[in-house]
Image (cartoon, helix red, strand yellow):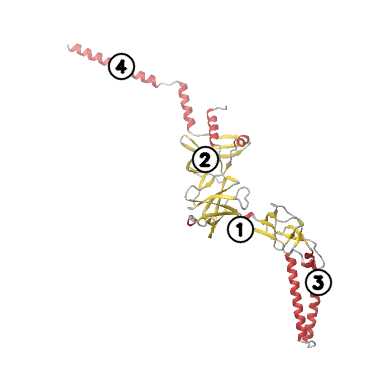
Amino acid sequence: MNNKRMKSIKLINMKIFILAGFILFSLASCNQQTPGEQETGSEESEASEGLTPVTLTDQQVNALSIKVDTLAKYVFKDMVVVNGYLNVPPQNKASVTAIIGANIASIEVFEGDKVKKGQTLAYLSHPNLLDVQTEYINAQSELVFMEQEYKRQKKLYKEQVTSGKVYQKTQADYFMLKGNVLNLEAKLNLLHLDPSKVSQGTIYEKVPVLSPINGYVAKVEIRTGQFVEPQKPMFEVVNNDRIHADLMVFEKDIYKVKTGQKVVFTVESLPGEPMTATIFAVGKAFEQNPKAVHVHANIDNKRGVLIPGMYITGRIATNNKLVNALPEEAVVNEGGKSYIFTSQKNDGGWLFIPLEVISGLNEDGWIEIRLLAPVKAGTKFAWNGAYYLLSEMKKNETGDDD
């Protein structure tokens, strides 16, 4: 009986061993892969580890209108929205007027011309101008005679040959005539005529109108042959060297604004190219319509052609903190990471290199860019076309040239 029981136990153990071996063999078969499947998985792993640079020709860059520039500055929070105009200080504007009534003999400049201080803008002619010169010559001749007579009477008076009354009359006439000569000489200087040459007999038929400052001719308000009255504006000359942002800050926000704060603004002619400025003056009086204060800011990075009177919109960083930013079209997400593309010019094209960053705030089409490591000053980036660049890089990784 015991022998039969022992044989039965051995038979059961053998069956369990055979069943366990069969299960292990089945699991091993399920885990096996073909060589082709293993290679495919390896390639996918390598492709997901990072992006590779891509080169585009100049023709491709132009066709895609890819813009390349350095990182921009943008304000996302703690800001005051403002608008205003570009302006220049009063000393950088000049209204050129006529000193004396005369006719316009010729006009030497056009609106928009660049002029230097002392450059001739126009010529005037009129009999009155000739009369001033003739009067100066006559008065100076009389002064020479009167000076001699004054010295003679002075000598005679000292010698008690002539009376004090005669001497005093001669002295008064001499100084009065001398004052008249100086007055006429000052008029000639105002008319930009050389008194020394006039005294020698040179008569100028035309009188030059000169620019008082360096700058550009903003307005020409006369025409040839026109008679201009004294003090009538003929030209306006503007020097744009100190062009700045003249902003209007409303009453509710003025307490937040102070000198030294940064402003980010755009002009209508360059809507996608923000500029920065630093506030240097805050007005102390309100404009009544609208009730706002003028705030003036020097432009830090001038772009394009800036002309006084251009309308601008901007934001004042009241916490005086700016961040790096790029347009939305410059940032692409891949594998849960954000990338932008540095841009380098090479022979016949551009090299775009992906750079991992952290994207921050997003506002009005701009994204805050937080660099994971510093970049060299002047490094340029693609401002748009990021999705196209990503697509090209993926083609290169997979070897798809179609």
Q: Earlier in the sequence, mark 3 or mark 1?
A: 1
Q: Which residue is mark 1?
A: 89
Report the amino acid beneath label 2.
Answer: Glu
The furthest residue to the bottom? 160
Q: Which mark is residue 138?
A: 3
Q: Nearer the viewer, residue 313 or 38?
A: 313
Q: How would you rate the neighbour count of disc 3 (Cα within 10 Å): few for under 14, some for 14-19, many for 20 or more?
A: few
For label 2, the crowd category at 10 Å Cα-Cα, with few meaning under 14, some 14 to 19 and many 20 or more, is some
Which residue is under mark 2? Answer: 328
Report, in whole angstroms, how far the alpha carbon at label 2 lies from the one at label 3.
78 Å
Q: Residues within 10 Å of mark 4 (few under 14, many from 20)?
A: few
Q: Callout 2: helix, strand or loop?
A: helix
Q: Nearer the viewer, mark 2 or mark 3?
A: 3
Q: Amino acid at mark 1?
A: Pro
Question: Which SS class for mark 4?
Answer: helix
Quarter of the view holding residue 9: top left
Q: Which mark is residue 219?
A: none
Q: For the residues carrying marks 2 and 1, which lies nearer the camera in this image? A: 1
Tag 2 and tag 1, C-beta contact below 8 Å = no
Position of residue 250 in the picture relative to residue 243 (left or right): left
Q: Which residue is mark 4?
A: 19
Q: Earlier along the polypeptide chain: callout 2 or callout 4?
A: 4
**Where's residue 245, x and y in %?**
57, 53
* Marks 3/1: CA–CA distance: 44 Å
Give the alpha-carbon distance from disc 1 to disc 4, as whole Å. Answer: 98 Å
Mark 1 neighbour density, 10 Å: few (under 14) some (14–19) many (20 or more): some
